[in-house]
Image (cartoon, rainbow, N blue to C red):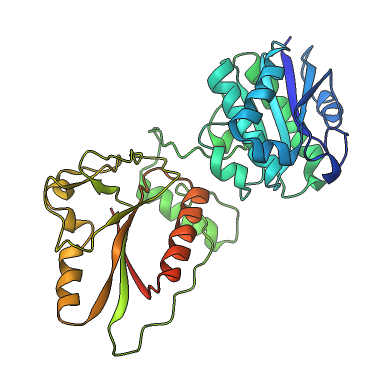
Amino acid sequence: MARIVHYLNQFFGGLGGEDQAGMGPVSEPGPVGSGRGLTRFLEGEDRIVGTVIGGDNYMAQGGSRAVDEAIGLIAGFDPDVVVAGPAFGSGRYGLACGAVCKAVIEHLGVPAVTGLHPDSPGAADYRAWVPTLATAETAAGMGTALERLAHLASRLGRGEELGSAAEEGTLTKGLRRNTFEGLRGSTRAIEMLLTKMRGEPFATEWPLPRYEPAEASEPITTGAPFRLALVTEAGIVPAGNPDRLPSGWATDWMRYPIQDREGFAEGEFESVHGGIDTSFANQDPDRQVPLDAARSMEQVGRLSLHPELLSTTGNMGTLRDMTRIGAEMGRALIADGVQAVIVGST
């Protein structure tokens, strides 16, 4: 028998709507709210021994402290597996489900699973760590989601390893494993093409990520010198990385003065990017951030250079954090009158 603890928000836990979104985590014995539906699909003698309920706003605003409170209540039920949600396309609720499951796995050493829509913020932030069932966007898909979550939870509670995302209906974690196929790649590609031409369903072996479209800015048409800024996601920082910019999973960005520099000298600046060989960038940081070239254009009156380098590390950064960082940088540069930006990439 697997002992299951269920995490819910205040709405699906039956404690109220937005009027209760600020409530801290509480616990109840047995199944509560949508957990009663989950119970119907559990296998064998598996059962929900307790439910932990957290308010959407409290969990979103409380950060790690709020998650720790929920984890303390979960641990009190001595679970074999934890189920969070499903939260579908919800923002705050989905993020809380992902954070709680990640903490359960890391701090309690207990498997956990949640259900989220692929485009939800929680999926973007936590799918790399947490087994995440792909659900419908709204609670209209509740029945199907609960049935599939119950199946996954029972298997995890028995100590089974889950198969691939395609086999389990979960979201990919971004990991690639080598497998052996009976047909060579060219043959599989042709068969896939013929299947598509016949209008039959097919599954690609290389799914592409989906990004929000970004409209290009209007070109600068004035003949006068324009204000240019240098930005990089290559982790270019002063030697020794005094501000401790992470080599990956960065959630912040830094500003470094460059107004008195003609270029970046070896030994004075370096790249802390953890996803590339940084030796060439460290020998000549201008390869990543073309300060020397921009300065030469400034000297002949082509442009006016912004006095700071804006730097972060894009390695393994979540789409959510990188979008936020980009927006923060953009607002700061617009406020300084910047008209164009060169982003030094890896």
Quadrant in the picture for residue 107: top right
Q: Is residue 98 left or right of residue 256?
A: right
Looking at the picture, how far across and down is residue 59, in whole percent? 68, 36
Q: How many marks?
A: 0
Considering every residue shown, the one lying at the far front of the view is: 260
* Viewer-nearest residue: 72 or 174: 72
Looking at the picture, how far across and down is residue 157, in whole percent? 66, 16
Looking at the picture, how far across and down is residue 207, in whole percent? 48, 50
Q: Is residue 131 visible?
A: no
Name the residue: 18% across, 76% down. 297
Name the residue: 60% across, 17% down. 110
**145 w.r.t. 187: above or below:** above
Looking at the picture, how far across and down is residue 140, in whole percent? 81, 47
* Viewer-nearest residue: 329 or 28: 329
Name the residue: 83% across, 36% down. 12
Q: Is residue 138 left or right of residue 200?
A: right
Q: Is residue 275 visible?
A: yes
**318 w.r.t. 307: above or below:** above
Name the residue: 60% across, 53% down. 201
Q: Is residue 82 left or right of residue 167?
A: right
- Rendered-image quadrant of the N terminus: top right
